């Protein structure tokens, strides 16, 4: 033990570890001083005895040593059996400064720091987005926060106590959104009033605690008022007392007769197992509004009608001649015209009347591809004025032509303005809900690189999320391969279902394929699924055109089990030609997977590229 290292005084820190109070320390150190003086006296007497050459040591020579060992033994016993009385400094524990508030979520102290102003707790906007909701949109143009609810959009000015809804102001009684030099903060009272997030606030130091909704915990109930310590030992410092106003919860871990517990405000500690019991506790639910959906009571079977010129509208009767079992037609009529949010249109009133008379719904498509280079999509979506103008123009077209729905196909979105895109979708959903028209949004199959499209947020507010399960291999890609293998489709569908309710999901299949031309003299390799090499060209072709090419080039056709479709291949004039065919056989396999998933429906690109017999397969969706 350290006591045997020599005779010395102990530091205040060492006595803290042992558990002594200040009065105890003074007494022990006084005894040590007395011992030192006595030792000096003894040494003087020894010198005298030596001078007289008595040859006998003084009888008191060993008393200091004995006293030292007695004190050491007492210290050891005190160290082993007396609990620490030192309390944890909570300001240091939470790391907060003046008017700062630690933010605790699910009994864990987060890295975020709030502030306290006029008795109200404010949470940083980034923490609100991470922990509570992403529906509060900071609009850079208007110097306010926008909150798209189910049927209205709230405007919440910074550093004010009211909400602007249309022409009315709703008074809250507290500053809802606070903005200062450090950033934007949301009042915790607003999170409680609007979303139902219950919180507990504490002082000295400031801290505020939240819990995830509807989570089951084991709440601790204490016998008497046991000390809660920083480690599973009586030598652990005191971090709390059982039975005070703080709720404590078991983590389920034990250590040598001690139970690990955490407080609602994020303190972690240990208490003797025999001093505590546990009971089940479920955290409060939150209140979130429900979107009124325009989801149909039948499966959607949608066909996109590609309109490249106004005259294409005139031939719609021919394209619909062999169509069976479909119920929605989506002509590609609109694209964004300029940075002001205007639309370029190829809509035709006669087309709408003809399609309606045949019993189809009309959901025209609005796209962001084919736009002029000077159009800045990010600028449009991030600007309040241009975003609202785009929404207004879409709604005006819906009313003018009597559409049943609208299909948004924005495929050029970048991650840096993806939040603006979601705000556009939310605000558009409010207007569509008011007008009682269907809002559908097209998406790529989900991958990590396109997660920013935020399908979960889309699925909350739109009626249908369409996943385009084609272009697995595309013109300009590095390898030749299937336009839509079965695995690609299933993965795209299942990935979307992880984020969107199944009744809102529509899976889109191709009515087209691609003819791949590969330089036979290059280092090419076909691995049974796709082909690498020097790709000369890749041409989209209809189902019927693909069959004509097979005959023209005398290609060999076999069933490819990797893609679940026919594969055609041959070499002509120094080039390898390959086609992963889309046929009634491969399409039926895809449709069976979609039906089995019991989702909202199916879509197909594009009308006129199909073989007429495939329409019989779609009867399964509403039989």
Image: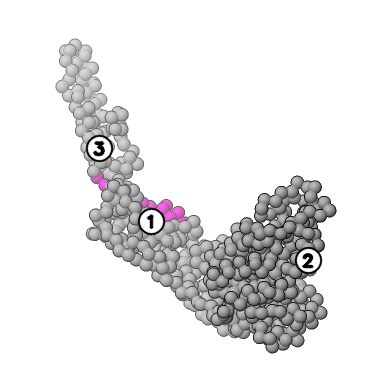
The residue depicted at 76 percent of the width and 75 percent of the height is 307
Q: Is residue 265 visible?
A: yes
How packed mark 1 is, by other alpha carbons closer than 10 Å (few <14, some 14-19, many 20 or more), is many
For residue 619: magenta? Answer: no
Instruction: Point out the tag, 2 or 1, that comes first from the N-terminus.
Output: 1
Residue 55: horizontal and vertical position, in percent?
17, 12
Q: Residue furthest right?
A: 573
Instruction: Point out the tag, 3 or 1, that comes first from the N-terminus.
Output: 3
- Of discs 3 and 2, which sits in the foreground? 2
Residue tagged by mark 2? 548
Residue stretch rendered in magenta on the structure: 82-97
Distance of label 2 from label 1 (alpha carbons): 73 Å
How did the renderer colour the structure?
one colour
Q: Main secondary structure of the magenta part?
A: loop
Q: Residue furthest top?
A: 53
Residue tagged by mark 3? 76
Give the answer, above or below, for where 274 lies relative to 503: above
Residue 240: horizontal and vertical position, in percent?
32, 56
The residue depicted at 84 percent of the width and 53 percent of the height is 573
Choose top left, top right, bottom left or bottom right for residue 47.
top left
Residue tagged by mark 1? 267
* 2 and 1 marks in contact (CB < 8 Å): no
Q: Quadrant of the N terminus?
A: top left
The residue depicted at 37 percent of the width and 67 percent of the height is 282
């Amino acid at each position: 033990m350290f006591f045997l290292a020599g005779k010395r005084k102990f530091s205040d820190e060492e006595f803290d570890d042992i558990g002594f109070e200040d009065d105890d320390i003074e007494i022990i150190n006084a005894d040590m001083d007395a011992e030192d003086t006595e030792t000096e006296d003894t040494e003087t007497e020894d010198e005298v005895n030596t001078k007289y050459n008595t040859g006998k040591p003084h009888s008191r020579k060993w008393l200091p040593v004995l006293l030292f060992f007695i004190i050491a033994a007492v210290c050891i016993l005190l160290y082993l059996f007396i609990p620490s009385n030192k309390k944890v400094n909570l300001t240091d524990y939470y790391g907060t400064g003046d008017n700062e508030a630690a933010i605790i979520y699910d009994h864990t102290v987060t890295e975020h720091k709030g502030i306290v102003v006029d008795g109200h707790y404010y949470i940083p906007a980034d923490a609100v987005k991470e922990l509570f909701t992403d529906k509060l949109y900071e609009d850079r143009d208007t110097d306010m926060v926008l909150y798209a609810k189910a049927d209205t959009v709230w405007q919440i000015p910074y550093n004010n106590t009211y909400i602007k809804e249309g022409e009315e102001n709703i008074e809250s009684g507290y500053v809802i959104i606070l903005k200062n030099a450090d950033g934007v903060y949301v009042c915790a009272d607003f999170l409680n009033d609007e979303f139902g997030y219950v919180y507990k606030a504490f002082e000295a130091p400031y801290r505020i605690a939240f819990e995830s909704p509807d989570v089951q915990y084991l709440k601790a109930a204490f016998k008497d008022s046991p000390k809660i310590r920083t480690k599973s030992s009586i030598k652990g410092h005191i971090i709390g007392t059982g039975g005070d106003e703080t709720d404590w919860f078991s983590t389920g871990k034990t250590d040598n007769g001690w139970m690990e517990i955490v407080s609602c405000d994020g303190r972690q500690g240990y208490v003797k197992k025999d001093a505590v019991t546990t009971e089940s506790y479920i955290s409060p639910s939150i209140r979130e509004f429900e979107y009124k959906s325009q989801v149909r009571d039948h499966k959607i079977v949608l066909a996109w009608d590609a309109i490249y010129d106004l005259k294409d509208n005139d031939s719609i009767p021919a394209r619909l001649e062999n169509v069976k079992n479909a119920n929605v037609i989506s002509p590609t009529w609109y694209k964004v015209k300029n940075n002001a949010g205007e639309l370029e249109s190829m809509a035709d009133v006669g087309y709408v009347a003809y399609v309606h008379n045949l019993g189809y719904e009309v959901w025209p498509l609005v796209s962001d591809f084919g736009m002029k280079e000077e159009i800045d999509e990010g600028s449009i979506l991030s600007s309040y004025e241009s975003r609202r103008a785009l929404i207004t123009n879409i709604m005006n077209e819906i009313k003018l032509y009597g559409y049943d729905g609208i299909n948004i196909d924005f495929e050029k979105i970048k991650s840096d303005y993806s939040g603006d895109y979601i705000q556009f979708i939310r605000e558009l959903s409010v207007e569509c809900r008011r007008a009682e028209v269907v809002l559908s949004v097209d998406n790529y199959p989900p991958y990590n690189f396109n997660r920013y499209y935020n399908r979960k947020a889309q699925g909350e507010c739109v009626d249908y999320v369409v996943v385009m399960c084609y272009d697995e291999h595309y013109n300009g890609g590095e390898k030749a391969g299937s336009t839509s293998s079965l695995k690609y489709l299933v993965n795209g569908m299942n990935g979307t279902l992880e984020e969107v309710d199944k009744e809102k999901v529509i899976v889109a299949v191709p009515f087209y394929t691609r003819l791949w031309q590969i330089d036979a003299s290059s280092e090419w390799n076909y691995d049974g699924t796709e082909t690498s090499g020097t790709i000369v060209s890749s041409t989209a072709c209809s189902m019927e055109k693909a069959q004509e090419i097979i005959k023209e080039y005398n290609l060999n056709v076999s069933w490819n089990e990797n893609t679940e479709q026919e594969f055609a291949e041959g070499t002509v004039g120094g080039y390898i030609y390959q086609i992963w065919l889309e046929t009634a056989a491969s399409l039926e396999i895809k449709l069976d997977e979609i039906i089995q998933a019991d989702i909202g429906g199916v879509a197909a690109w594009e009308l006129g590229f199909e073989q007429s017999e495939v329409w019989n397969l779609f009867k399964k969706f509403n039989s």
